[in-house]
Image (cartoon, grey):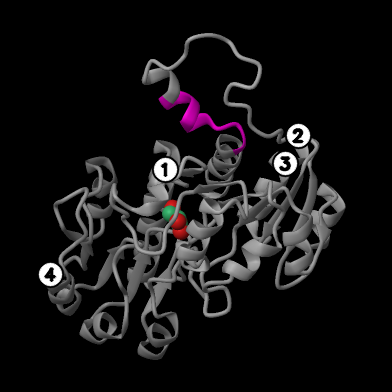
Amino acid sequence: MEMPSVFVARKLPEEVLKALRTFADVEMWDKEDEVCPRDLLLEKAKTSDALLTMLSDQVDKELLDACEGVKVIANLAVGYDNVDVEYAKEKGIIITNTPDVLTETTADLTFLLLMSAARRVTEAAAYIKEGKWTSWSPMLLAGADVHHKTIGIVGMGNIGRAVAKRAKGFDMNILYHNRSRDTEAEESLGAEYRSFEDLLQASDFVVCMTPLTSETKGMFDAGAFKKMKREAIFVNTSRGGTVVEEDLIAALRNGVIAGAGLDVFENEPIRADHPILQLENAVALPHIGSATRETRFAMMACSIENIKQVLEGEKPLTPVR
Ligand code: DGY
């Protein structure tokens, strides 16, 4: 019997592909660090039964229209702002994502960014490497405390809650803003609900964990940064589109806020001459929130299982609804 065909839009490790090959004929864009060329993706959409896409692939109307026999598109990420979910639904194509498996790993990196920005870790590492360390000095690279401070989490989903759990371990005062109240986080973590404005004004660390939607696009703009404390540190491991980047750069440059820890940007990848990289008070990482070996393998396994389920006529594990 002929096996269904799956196109994988990025080179994945051989052991992962092995699992896919047990139930499908697999074709793959064979580069690890390069986005699959659009023409190739459009061509494979015509002939495949399933696609495994990355967050850097635009699953838009054009691509969905090209899908002649595609039943499922498994997006290798929890976020799916690169996918036109509504149109996929109209076309009867199932979209899946990879929630849960990356929650703790992404929360770890969020906290790492928060601490790195507070304690000036990248500046300090560069200082020692550049041979500038001549003596212990009372105020050398003095940063800000994290413990007992106030963290404001915007977007209290699974990852937001996992960040709050870490904050509780640091005896932080936890505020959150969300579309709906999270009574569980309030009871178990002592998190307090605040309006967006109140949260901005009261937090020492403002952490963006909200997905990118038409409502959250650009929500961190000049007005938002102005409401924050001058000592505030802004952290974003969600999506760069939630921030008006030039406003953030101006706020960091002009001392409107004290610092930032960023794993995501408006247009990724950013280049070495991006203005954010010229700022000493910003710690920038190349979108590695979920990048541990364990978690990336778990995300790939989740995507493969979703494809398998759909191609076998079953319900996927983690459909985007
Ligand atoms: C996601 O899954 O949405 C992250 O941004 C990448 O791991």
Read off the residue under disc 3: 167
Q: Amino acid at mark 3?
A: Ala
Read off the residue under disc 1: 291
Read off the residue under disc 2: 147
Residue at position x 58%, y 68% in the image: 222
Looking at this view, is 92 or 147 the one in front?
147
Q: Amino acid at mark 4?
A: Leu
Compare marks 4 and 1 and give the one earlier in the sequence: 4
Structural distance between the alpha carbons of marks 1 and 2: 26 Å
Compare marks 3 and 2 and give the one earlier in the sequence: 2
Q: Residues within 10 Å of mark 3 (few under 14, many from 20)?
A: many
Could you tell me residue 226's position as x and y percent? 66, 63
Question: Can you tell me whether the CB of the residue at mark 1 lies under 8 Å from the nearest atom of ligand 1?
Answer: yes
State yes or no: discs 1 and 3 in contact (Cβ < 8 Å): no
Q: Start and end of the magenta stretch?
A: 118-126
Looking at this view, is 310 or 261 the one in front?
261
